[in-house]
Image (cartoon, coloured by chain):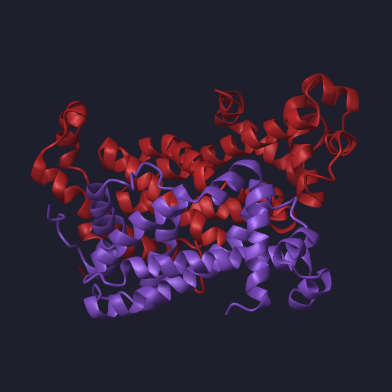
């Protein structure tokens, strides 16, 4: 995993963190990685665009790996969602590079993030299916459709919580039991304090 | 508020049709076209240009040609030039969008209908919007940067402000706000990332989604409130709530197995 490709990704990320997305060039990435330009092109024949896309994908993957680690000890579907929402929101808010780019170059970042998050809907849904299966579904609800719906909503709340405060455990518990799960697994009743 | 002027213009009634006709072009006869205010003609001209060639490639000359007026007229109405025209286009389209939504939601007769009508209309308007769909393909950064993170929060707040009153016939204010925001999330998500077999421009499919996922969530939302009583800030709404209680059509009866 720690081959040249990984080294290039890490080097590019370091450049992006320092100078931003649009100012990072193949030369910068190569220099930072201690490799030649030709080597970078061998791993990323599509050039700069492919490289930047790969960095965004890789960061997305890292994020979801840490999210998975955060929730995988949870014992119930509700707990998975609650821990996941709190952790994911906090990670986004505290992600300095992401926040900086959102402020300085959203027009470069957003199309890439949208493409990634559309791919992510499937990943999150796939992750939820076993939990839904174990929990049992409300009558007449198809599990994959429900997982897809849940994944969309989760990504929406993480990115833009609207009036919800995802730092407040009580609100998160309410959100999970109402807008997320009520129609999917049946109503769960108020959260226990 | 910036939205006020075009909003009033359109809520005024007939004029909305007139404005829309200029977009589709030829059906409007000359006297009627001439009677359309220059401001509206410029805005619709700009919209037609954007639908054809995007924002970056649209010049004020293009706009003037599409609006069938001179470049000087465009500058007279919008001294700020292209940026000012684009700002007015956004404001006008936002206003038209919410006006259309208001018409649909205002005609609904129960909670399920108001949600289905609002979501279907919103999805249809967006997917049939020539300028918007062109931008999503060719200049996606202009649109997408508005639909995530803090900008999306602003968009949700705006949607709430416009649509909450239409839910108020069946829900109290706090519930209305929640549900308005939630419905907006659902629409944006399915529009930006289409799902197999879910087409939100089809009212039948929206109704299924609403029955399956949204109405149970609304019922679950109000359970704890009923149990704990209302918070002081909601106290003034108690009377209204009670008076609505009798003719409030709770979605439980709307034929889904629970």
Q: Position of residue B11 (x, y in %)?
A: 55, 30
Picture residue at 36% right of the left edge, 52% below the top:
B113
Which one is nearer the viewer's eye here, B55 or A134?
Answer: A134
| Residue occupying the point 79% across, 68% down | A47
Q: In which quadrant is the N terminus of chain B drawn? A: top right
Q: Is residue A92 above or below residue B244?
A: below
Q: Is residue B107 visible?
A: yes
B131 left or right, relative to A135: right
Q: Nearer the viewer, residue A164 or A12?
A: A12
Side of B241 relative to B22 (left or right) = left
Q: How many marks?
A: 0
- Whether residue B128 appears in this view of the structure is no
Residue B65 image point, x, y percent: 89, 37
For the C terminus of chain B, the quadrant is bottom left
Give the image location of residue A174, x and y in percent: 24, 52
Q: Position of residue A136 (x, y in %)?
A: 23, 77
Colour that chain B carries in the picture: red
Q: Colour of chain A?
A: purple
For residue A104, side relative to residue B204 (left or right) = right
Image vertical order of residue A99 relative to residue B242, above or below: below
User: For the point 32% across and 58% down, which residue is it?
Assistant: B214
A78 to the left or right of B3: left
């Amino acid at each position: 995993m720690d081959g040249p490709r990984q080294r290039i990704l890490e080097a590019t990320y370091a450049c992006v963190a320092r100078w931003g997305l649009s100012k990072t060039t193949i030369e910068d990435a190569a220099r930072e990685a201690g490799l030649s330009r030709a080597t970078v092109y061998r791993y990323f024949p599509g050039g700069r665009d492919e490289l930047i896309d790969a960095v965004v994908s890789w960061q997305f993957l890292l994020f979801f790996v840490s999210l998975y680690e955060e929730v995988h000890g949870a014992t119930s579907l509700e707990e998975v969602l609650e821990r996941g929402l709190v952790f994911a929101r906090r990670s986004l808010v505290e992600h300095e590079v992401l926040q900086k780019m959102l402020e300085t170059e959203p027009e470069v970042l957003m199309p890439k993030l949208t493409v990634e998050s559309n791919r992510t809907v499937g990943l999150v849904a796939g992750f939820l299916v076993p939990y839904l299966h174990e929990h049992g579904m409300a009558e007449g609800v198809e599990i994959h459709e429900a997982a897809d719906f849940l994944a969309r909503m989760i990504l929406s709340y993480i990115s833009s919580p609207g009036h919800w405060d995802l730092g407040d455990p009580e609100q998160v518990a309410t959100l999970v039991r109402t807008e997320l799960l009520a129609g999917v697994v049946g109503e769960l009743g108020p959260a226990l304090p | 508020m910036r939205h006020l002027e075009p909003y009033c213009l359109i809520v005024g009634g007939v004029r909305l049709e007139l404005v829309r006709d200029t977009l589709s072009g030829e059906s409007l006869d000359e006297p009627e076209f001439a009677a359309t205010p220059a401001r509206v003609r410029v805005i619709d001209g700009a919209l037609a240009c954007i639908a054809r060639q995007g924002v970056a490639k649209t010049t004020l000359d293009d706009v003037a040609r599409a609006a069938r007026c001179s470049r000087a007229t465009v500058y007279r109405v919008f001294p700020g030039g292209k940026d000012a025209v684009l700002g007015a286009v956004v404001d006008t389209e936002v206003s038209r969008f919410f006006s259309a939504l208001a018409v649909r939601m205002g005609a609904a007769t129960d909670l399920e209908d108001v949600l289905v009508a609002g979501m279907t209309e919103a999805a249809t308007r967006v997917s049939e919007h020539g300028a918007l769909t062109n931008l999503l393909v060719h200049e996606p950064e202009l649109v997408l940067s508005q639909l995530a993170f803090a900008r999306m929060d602003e968009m949700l707040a705006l949607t709430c402000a416009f649509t909450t009153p239409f839910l108020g016939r069946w829900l109290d204010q706090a519930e209305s706000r929640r549900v308005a925001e939630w419905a907006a999330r659902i629409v944006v998500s399915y529009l930006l990332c289409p799902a197999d077999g879910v087409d939100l421009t089809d009212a039948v499919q929206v109704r299924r989604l609403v029955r399956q996922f949204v109405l149970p969530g609304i019922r679950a939302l109000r359970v704890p409130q009923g149990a704990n009583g209302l918070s002081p800030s909601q106290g003034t709404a108690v009377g209204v709530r009670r008076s609505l209680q009798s003719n409030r059509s709770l979605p439980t009866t709307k034929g889904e197995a629970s």
